[in-house]
Amino acid sequence: MEEIWKGSLEGYLNKPELLMEMVHPDDAPLLLNKYERLLQGHACNFEFRLYFPDSFDKKVRLDAYPIMDEGDQVTAISGMVEDITLQTQYLDYLIEFTRKKNTALEIVSHDLRGPLAIVRSIADSLEKDHQEQVYDEITNYTRFIKQACESCVNLISDVLNEEHLKSHTINVNFDRVEIVQKVREVIEPYASSESISQTFEVIAPSRAFAIIDIVKFDQIMNNLIANSIKFTKPDGKITITIKDEANHVLVAHHDDGVGIPEKDQPYIFDRFTKAAREGLSGEKSVGIGLSIVKNLVDIQGGQIWFESKEGKGTTFFISLQK
């Protein structure tokens, strides 16, 4: 008792109500309710917190049983109290670790699709050109493949690194990046792919700098582009506009696709959202792409919002720190 409650056993024996003074105020009603049930002859086991103003709270588990006489009257209460603070912390850590592991695997399995689709498209183009003995684009093809592979490796390294899995927070590696060139680099493989029919345009000043995590910004752009391709007709257009404003850089990603139904718009950033739907060519959707995008924007200190109208298209706005 002295070890758990940090008081004098003699003092608690002389004045038992002192025990209740250390119970966390939020848990006191539950404890009193359980005590009344014990007096009625019911055994109980439950957990509650002890409050120490100058230290951390303790989590304890109580197992208590009524002792009855021959007339089924409660004459005493017996039981055991155990300090389970460390057990609770370990369990919370295990739950958080499992959550982060699952999140990491979801991100990797989802976000590798874009770069791998580019590699597959280029492989098809290489095969076609080889059959026709046309080798003018070999240099570009190899450059795109190298960029896609680097993107995959960087993504895997970033999401599955030991620090990411151990920490309760996501590690962010900030750099001051010339974002216009970065956006053009992300778009180029899509715009050059023979399997992608939509046209691409970048409207931007000659240069604009933002403070971003490069790998996470790649993930954001690849997710938005893949989403636009999925919901834009083959003759459609995807436009990315960059504005260098006073306190931030604004990236507006627009497509003239089918738009987002109004009833789905409140849920568009939810994880495994019920707003998930098949693409125009029957592409499956698991409903985590835009939740990943929002999370990646948030952890970089940015903001994201969108405007959409059915049949007119969708624009995602991303505000980034300068």
Image (cartoon, rainbow, N blue to C red):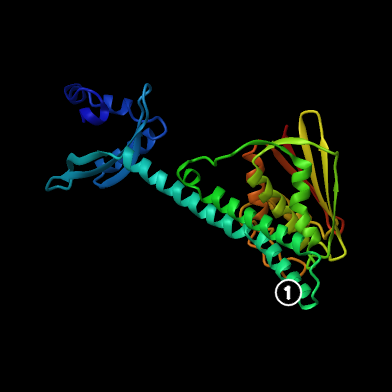
Which quadrant of the figure has residue 217?
top right
Q: Which residue is mark 1?
A: 127
Say whether residue 1 is left or right of residue 227.
left
Taking 277 as reference, is 173 above or below it?
above
- Residue at the spot 50% in from the left edge and 45% down from the top edge: 164
Query: Which quadrant is home to the N terminus?
Result: top left
| Residue 281 position within the rendered picture, expressed as x and y whole percent measured from the top left | 76, 70
For the residue pair 101 and 56, the one nearer the viewer reads as: 101
SS at circle 1: helix
Q: Residue furthest left?
A: 70
- Residue at the spot 70% in from the left edge and 69% down from the top edge: 123
Say whether residue 244 is left or right of residue 38.
right
Kindly tell me whether residue 57 is visible in this rendering: yes
| Residue 53 position within the rendered picture, expressed as x and y whole percent measured from the top left | 38, 22
| Residue 110 position within the rendered picture, expressed as x and y whole percent measured from the top left | 62, 59
- Could you classify mark 1 by the number of other residues whose Cα lies within 10 Å: few (under 14), some (14-19), or many (20 or more)? few
Taking 88 as reference, is 313 above or below it?
below
For the residue pair 128 and 243, the one nearer the viewer reads as: 128
